């Protein structure tokens, strides 16, 4: 795994990870760059809020763009929405430009089309991009569940109906175009998935294996990894 760094942390310790994300964003803002931060939902919502709380954006007003890695489609503000969970937890949206996925479009196809347009424009400006991702016990990352139909997508985002939600998610194309990815993996239930991700095998079976090819990957985990990275 090229350009990969593994940092062992105490179990469920968000502090080191939040510091890293915040420090990385501040580093690039301080040298005059603009930053696009792709945040995840689920177990990563608390981490995103903590990292945001360590950012003083007043000197860099509107130079940080907050986007979503993935979303569960539905009406604006529905209870399973990753964006709504960020809001409910108190993620500070001030002094930054925000890009929720769900809008007032009537269907997921139009919603994805608009988000692809927005993200393509943002990345086209050459801003520094950092993705904050998690890993599911089944080996999924972002909203890319095992055997999903988007692994070869030519777009940055796609839509499909999963066994649980209607999912709008970043694709391998987006993830591979990020400047760096931070992967936070905590808990015994994810040990097998993390080991499988590191081992060779099918990306359809373990979608998180796409992370082995990103430009820069930092894994924060309380799980002991067997073998070399």
Image (cartoon, helix red, strand yellow):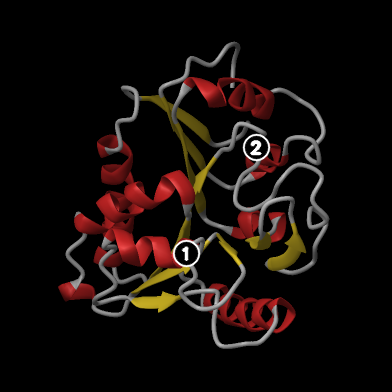
189 over 208 or under it: above or below: above
Q: Quadrant of the N terminus?
A: top right
Residue under label 2, please give it.
212
The residue shown at (73%, 35%) is 206
Count neighbours of disc 1 (C-alpha within 10 A) and say few if under 14, some if 14 to 19, many if 20 or more: few
Q: Quadrant of the C terminus?
A: top right
147 displayed left or right of 167? right
Badge 1 marks a residue whose secondary structure is loop
First in sequence: mark 1 vs mark 2: 1
Q: How many marks?
A: 2
- Distance CA(mark 1)–CA(mark 2): 33 Å
- Looking at the picture, tell me which residue is in the foreground, 23 or 146: 146
Residue under label 1, please give it.
79
218 displayed left or right of 104? left
209 displayed left or right of 95? right
The residue shown at (57%, 81%) is 118
């Amino acid at each position: 795994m090229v350009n990969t760094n593994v940092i062992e942390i105490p179990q469920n310790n968000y502090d080191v990870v939040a510091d890293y994300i915040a420090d990385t964003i501040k580093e690039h803002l301080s040298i005059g760059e603009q930053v696009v931060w792709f945040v995840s939902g689920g177990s990563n919502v608390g981490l995103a809020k903590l990292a945001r709380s360590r950012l003083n954006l007043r000197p860099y007003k509107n130079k940080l763009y907050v986007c979503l890695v993935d979303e569960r489609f539905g009406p604006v503000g529905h209870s399973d929405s990753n964006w709504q969970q960020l809001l409910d937890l108190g993620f500070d949206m001030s002094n930054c430009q925000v890009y929720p996925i769900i809008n007032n479009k009537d269907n997921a196809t139009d919603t994805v089309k608009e988000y692809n347009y927005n993200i393509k424009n943002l990345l086209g400006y050459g801003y520094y991009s950092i993705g904050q991702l998690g890993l599911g016990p089944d080996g999924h990352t972002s909203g890319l569940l095992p055997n999903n139909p988007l692994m070869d997508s030519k777009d940055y985002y796609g839509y499909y109906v999963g066994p649980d939600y209607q999912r709008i998610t970043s694709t391998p194309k987006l993830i591979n175009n990020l400047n760096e990815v931070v992967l936070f993996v905590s808990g015994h239930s994810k040990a097998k998935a993390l080991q499988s991700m590191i081992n060779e095998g099918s990306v359809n079976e373990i979608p998180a294996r796409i992370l082995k090819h990103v430009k820069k990957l930092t894994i924060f985990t309380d799980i002991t990894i067997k073998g070399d990275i």
